[in-house]
Image (cartoon, rainbow, N blue to C red):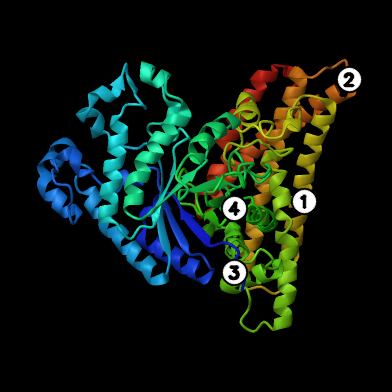
Amino acid sequence: MKYDFNVRAFEIHSLYAWDFEWIIKSMDFMTANGFNTLILHRNDFIDLIVYPGKYFGCKKDHYNSIFERYKEIFRTLYKFTPTRRSGPYQRRAFLKRILLEAGRRGINVYIENKELYFPDIILEFYPELVKNGKICATDPFWIEFTKVKYREFFEEFPEVSGIITSPATGESRVSINSNRCSCDRCRNTSKAEWFRNVLMAMYEPIHAAGKQLVVRDFVFNPDAHRDISEAMESLPSDVVLSLKNTPHDYYPTFPINPRIGNVGKHEQWIEFDAMGQYFGWGVCIADLMEDYRFRMKDALAKGASGVVFRTDWESLDGHTAFGNMNKINLYSAGMLSRDTDASSESIYDAFLSAEGWYPSEATLGQRKSLVQWFCGLMSRTWNIASKTMFVKNCVFSDSSLVPISFAHALWLAEEKNSLKDWQKEKASALLPIPEEYAEIINEKELALDDASDIVSEVAANNPGFEKEKYDYFVSCFENQLLYVRLFRNAAEAIFSCRYIKEGDEKQNPEMYEKSRNIFHTSMEDLLAMSVELDSFWKNTEYRPHIIYTLLDPDRIRCLYDDLKEVVDDESLF
């Protein structure tokens, strides 16, 4: 079999990163499906597993283990940070066991975080790090601190293959991108310079340990892209650059990241999402097989050597791609990363077989027929998802949740997650222009029609799958229909509201009147759905709980009340 990518990585976030049994099961899945690299992601991972000893009283240049450090500093630790005293050495055993099990399976392990991170006690030890109430991002201390903690980490865990980090997101505790310090040094330090200083502070101990530094271009706008690009391209050539497959975040409606193939001599890894932070969490099923195929082929043509697939999201504890129908994306990821020409039928067959959907007595011909039937449904799911929580390819959701207000929706779509930053022709996509507005309404109706059709098809009869699996399949599409209905009502209400408030009534009086009618109907539907979902909450018992987060009646009522205030026209209610 052709192995297209050298690195085929499986990324675990969230609390699962501390669940030993879960990670063992994940590694077994990796082995069975051709993945060779495990990434454990938590923003403060390093800081939870090293002290570092120097700042609590360790004097020597080298220690054989964390216990030798601990015997020198246990009194200081207990005095200043008692709740953290035992945490690092307890987590040590966890990571050592994971590394042992990974080694037995031939799996490399990387730790992913966001820098800069540090324990709170550091600010008490070095109060000068805070200037006028703001943490100073450019204080030279951070460079020393970074070197010390990575040196200590690799003394303790030489089995780890490397570190993956994001210095440009503002999601760390200290970053030049979210720096509020106004001291002279901060005002005179460019973002590119800061990025390079921090990354080189990491590179020095990582390289000395014979390990790999991987830097992510995780950013939110073109300006940040330029800043981090300047720093990344100046790094030593053995630093790997990890790029999201789209330029902003994991939005499958967005174009290919223009940085891919433009990283000089650096090795490139390309990142994908499988669970669906921005495409429905699996409640709205999103089979991304063909999107993966298209983007992987493009990445290979541009010299990429690795792909990374994340299975969950650090802000959504207790949920993963393993827990819903988006698990098909993990099978696609494994097979396509080894052979981008793997047929869709072979991928679906692998999923159905491994997940126990086939009856034991099914013949080869019956299995083939079931695969074709399953393919016919699943291949339609992304088209529905893309028209549900996106509006004309623009981001409309709050990480798959319905916006909570008119202003929130427009901020998400036009500011925070702007598609027009990357595709200038999208500048007018959401404006209250008759043609644009009509396309938005039509798109939402198509999504609802397609979702309704699939429910009718799957509810009609079981073509031959195991009953328990098929009943689950039916329930998934029924719940998806609720979700699609909710987004259809919300989107039509919000963009009709915009047309009423900002559109030109004289330019097209018929469309203006239509927008008022659609607004009235969609608001009635939103209110009715809030009552319907009250009952859904009380009378169903779905696991995991996240479906109730997506279908929260209180969130709908918040949106309804806001839109009523924005329109302020009693004749419409």
Amino acid at circle 4: Gly
Determine which of the numbered discs, if any, sits on residue 468 in the image. 3
Residue 95, image x, y percentages: 31, 58
Residue at horizontal 30%, vertical 41%? 147
Query: Quick one: quadrant of the C terminus?
Result: top right
Task: Tell me which label, 3 or 4, sits earlier in the chain.
Answer: 4
Determine which of the numbered discs, if any, sits on residue 136 in the image. none
Mark 1, secondary structure of its residue: helix
Task: Tell me which label, 2 or 4, sits earlier in the chain.
Answer: 4
User: In the image, is 325 to the left or to the right of 167?
Assistant: right
Residue 193, image x, y percentages: 44, 30
Mark 2, secondary structure of its residue: helix
Mark 4, secondary structure of its residue: loop
Q: CA distance from mark 1 to mark 3?
A: 25 Å
**Residue placed most toward the observer, 362 or 414:** 414
- Pointer 3 with pointer 4, Cβ within 8 A: no
Dot 2 corresponds to which residue? 509
Residue neighbourhood size for the residue with mark 2, other residues' Cα within 10 Å, grouped as few (<14), some (14–19), many (≥20): few
